[in-house]
Amino acid sequence: MPKDLPSDEIRRALHRAADLAADYLESVERHPVVPRIQPGDVARQLPVAPPEHPEAMDAILDDYLRLIEPNVTHWNHPGFLAYFGITGSGPGVVAETLAAALNVNAMLWRSGPAPTELEGRVCDWLRQLMELPEGFHGHINDTASSSTLVALAAARHRLPGLAVRERGLAGRPEVPPLVVYACDQAHSSVDKAAIVLGLGQENVRRVESDAAFRMSVPALAAAVAADRAAGRLPMAVVATVGSTSTTSIDPVEEIADLCAREGIWLHVDAAYAGSAAICPESRALMQGIERADSLVTNPHKWLFTPVDCSVLFVRDLANLQAAFSLVPEYLRTGDAGVTNLMDLGFQLGRRFRSLKLWMVLRAYGVEGLRAHLREHCALALALAERITAEPGFELAAPVPFSTVCFRAVPAGLADPAALDRFNERLLAGINAAGPFFLSHTALRGRYTLRVAIGNVKTTARHLDALWDLVQETARGLLPE
């Protein structure tokens, strides 16, 4: 039995896979965004036991076409507007294929010289585009959840006199509770990081937001003062630039002033909106991010790079390495003056993620990327204007980037609970139609619809069709 497929069979299968991928990207709109299936439908068509004998790649690819492609939620669909748009653009798809062929684990420079050095360079390209200071060092994790966890672990390590790396937190009554602060609009990954790091959810302070869903700095200052008075130790503040529900922007400059006075680590979660910082007019909305101790942005959210690609920037690289570096004998190489990516987080294995970001940046160019981001923001503003002008609808939040939050408010339907039910039914009707997929959130306790524009192929034509569908569906829910 051959140890692998013969090269001619690999080539033939890859050629067919290339055609399948290109055909899919070209004609994805033939699918409803969300497949019309029920839980278990796919599993029932899969054998319960693995095959005893080899199967032909053509047969496997046939089953891919039959079972997999039609039964995924199509994140690459231009009508996918539910969550922050993840576009697996062509250059990124090509890069993922080549990265899989190389199968590199760049845990050490020695185990992945080109991947390690390419990651350093493309992260620095992104740093320059975001107008971050030269002192920031970037590296790539899988998602912002991991990046935030790593950043908060570095914040914990910087606290003097605790020696948490060596002694841990358990069974140490002399260690005060460590507190992390975040806006009530911040992502749940902050809470998860607190769970993993042993801080506990009860030591995550959710600071109230203002009318524009931004963290209240006076409320933050009061929370820090109250915790210090109670003997707790403020560890980090997470400021959000582009919150998940509304894409609100915390007042980072004022938060940075407070953190500087109090000696608290400042982490900026720009997972979504950080991509927009490559546009000067959007970067102007983010004053103060350059003062962060750490910052995360996800090119896989709005920079057309296939998931997963999350860039974490840190100001103090030595502190990060001190928090995580652990080198067993079998990984000692003697290479001097190199970066070993395994020293920059809890993961030992490191996929070759930088290849896809490198190819996307080169294939689109900075001006090409800016043009797409600006188009998305313009589409969002145009939709917001339609919502504002249409009786029976209201805009629920400001629109600084490319996400629009709105509600239907039909005349004569004033009860809040009834309005929530109406909007819930409205969302269900829109999503059931097939060509679009929206999501919802709760703003000030009210059920709210979200339109998150981020796919590279989403155009004004799609937003026109969406608005027609929204109005038609809303009319159909009103009593005769």
Image (spheres, helix red, strand yellow):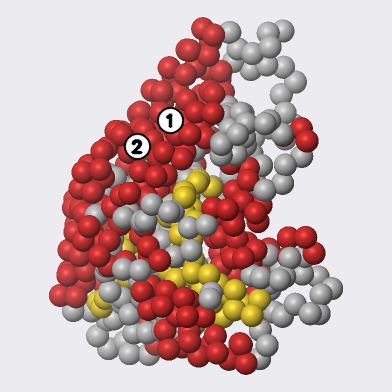
Q: Quadrant of residue 130?
A: bottom left
Residue type indicated by callout 2: Val
At label 1, the amino acid type is Ala
Rendered residue at 54%/28% (across/down): 113
Q: Is residue 401 above or below residue 341?
A: below
Local crowd at mark 1 within 10 Å, few (<14), some, or many (≥20)? Answer: many
Disc 2: CA contacts within 10 A as few (<14), some (14-19) or many (>=20): many
Quarter-wise, where is residue 332 in the image?
Answer: top right
Q: Which residue is mark 1?
A: 95
Q: Seen in the image, is 153 located left or right of residue 263?
A: right
Tag 2 and tag 1, C-beta contact below 8 Å: yes
Side of 57 relative to 261 (left or right): right
**What mark, if any, has residue 360 been given in the picture?**
2
Give me the residue at 17% from left, 70% from top: 385
Q: Quadrant of the N terminus?
A: top right
Q: Position of residue 352 (x, y in %)?
A: 52, 34
Label 1 element class: helix
Q: Position of residue 92 (x, y in %)?
A: 39, 35
Label 2 or label 1, whichever comes before in sequence order: 1
Residue closest to the eye, 245 or 233? 233
